[in-house]
Image (cartoon, coloured by chain):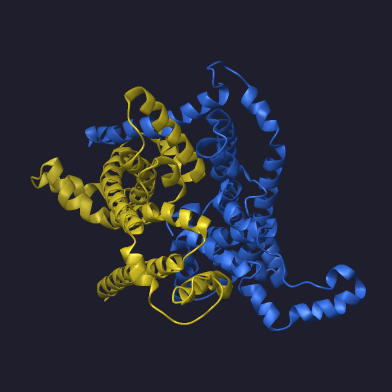
Chain colours: A yellow, B blue
Amino acid sequence: MLLFLYAPIFVLIVFSFNDSSSRTVWSGFTFKWYPELLTDASIMSAVYTTLLVSLLASAIATVVGTIAAIGFSSMRRQWRSPLLAVNNIPVMNADIVTGVSLCLLFVFAGQILGFRQGFVTLLIAHITFNIPYVILSVMPKIRQLDKNLVDAAQDLGCTWFGAFRRVVVPQIMPGIVNGAIIAFTLSIDDFIISYFTAGSKVFTLSMRIYAMTKKRVSPKINAISTLLFVSVLVLLVIVNVRQMRQEEKARRLARSINL
Amino acid sequence: MRNNRLLAAPYVLWMALFVIAPIILVVVYAFTSSSGGFTFANFSHMGQYAGVFGRSFLLAAIATVVCILLGYPLAHILSRENARLQRMSMMLIMLPMWMNFLLRTYSWMSILENTGLLNRFFAAIGLFKLINAVGGALSPEWADIAYFRMINTQGAVVLGMVYNFLPFMVLPIHSVISKIDRSLIEAAQDLGAKPSGVFRRVTLPLSLPGVLSGITMVFVPSVSTFVISQLLGGGNDLLLGDLIEMQFLGSAYNPHLGSAIALVMMIIVLICMLVMNRFGEGEEQAVLM
């Protein structure tokens, strides 16, 4: 099973060091594709665009999503349930439907207001599909929050905002951070939605890769894959180490209390 | 805390603009024609593509079934391991997911191609010579095979779907199975059930919500993908996703038809959502890893 899952990745990585342009014939070990990759302007600008969009979108989505989650939590069920259902639409819908519907919106609005698809529409699209995941990640934490703590803080003289900053935020922080990470990852990896909303001049890395796969020429693709894989691996290790440390802390705390 | 509710207002506005409005637009476009009149023509036009619909559903259904057959046992076995092994296995299973979807599909191309790795491997171990020798005696068309045609077939597309979406089947099932109350299983065993009976009457029914979630999370992307079918299917047999893409950005520019197809897809998703809300469980775990 693991072989099945990892074989393609392994193949990609191995062939990124291949000395010829072929995808399947091995003819010697070389690093030459990596520098070539770095000097390819179209790829580098796509990397820059992708990073910029992902960072901006996940940051904005995290802030807006967290605030919205707090707002949702204070609502009565009859308001909250339908709103949450709408919130979940981008999550449940096939990517292509989200992408296509946003494309329609941008083309339609663009005809009326006179703008074309580009970085801004790409950013809006990314924010739109990021926020639901942030909300999904933060709301459970809010539910676990002890409302008495906020009241206690206010009794001790905090303004509402002060109570928010010092009591609520630290407690829901794990949810916020997880939401931000998920949003960032989704944005970086996204292809279909970007494909439909970026217009003809702006390219994300995934879009560039798609163009390259259609032409199937250079092992630069393999080099990209290797780099991406390594960075994802590092990121996952960091996240998991964080999680393990948190659990270790919680366990130690529990042990010391039980003593 | 009363005015907290207003905090959600900006986002509600955003949702109205960028989630609801686009959907309304899709519906509108689906029911109009390019000259602006209300029409059902797009839907009858869709009838032309019944073959595409059928193929998409069939391939997605096959992929889903394969995912269940592969994923359920895997989830079950994993749920019995200790916690640390489970977490590591989950991570290992999810890790390929974090690689770019395009790249993963692309690499299957190099494995499955006519001159690709698998075929080269088979040639190197003399498999084809063997087939030619033995099969040639049986029938002339087996006499000179030089490779298996694996890529650009529908089988390759199903393989691509299974590969890409299998973890989305494993995770919900695992999440639900590991939460089954152990005492129920013990009770069944105390009452004299054999392991197969325990499975059939306790584990299986209780794990169905997870299976339902898994089905949704595999079927919906499979039915709507166009990357997998273009890269691994050679663009010959069109799937729904291909169709939609063509209508919006490709050769046959007809956003009305594309919206009609997209609307159908949204309805499918809506049905899946309703089913999941009633019966399903464990998908949030999968979505949030």
A231 shown above or below B263: below
**Residue B173 can be seen, yes or no:** no
Q: Quadrant of residue A119?
A: top left
Q: Residue furthest front?
A: A20
Foreground residue among B151 and B92: B151
Foreground residue among A24 and A255: A24
On screen, residue A187 versus residue B104, left or right, reads left
B261 shown above or below A126: above
Across and down, in percent, residue B114 comes to 66, 67
x 48%, y 68%: residue: B90
Q: Residue furthest right?
A: B138
Across and down, in percent, residue B8 comes to 29, 36
Name the quarter where the N terminus of chain B is drawn: top left
B58 shown above or below B86: above
x 39%, y 40%: residue: A199
x 16%, y 49%: residue: A165
x 66%, y 28%: residue: B45
Foreground residue among A152 and B89: B89
Name the quarter where the C terminus of chain B is drawn: bottom left
Across and down, in percent, residue A172 comes to 27, 53
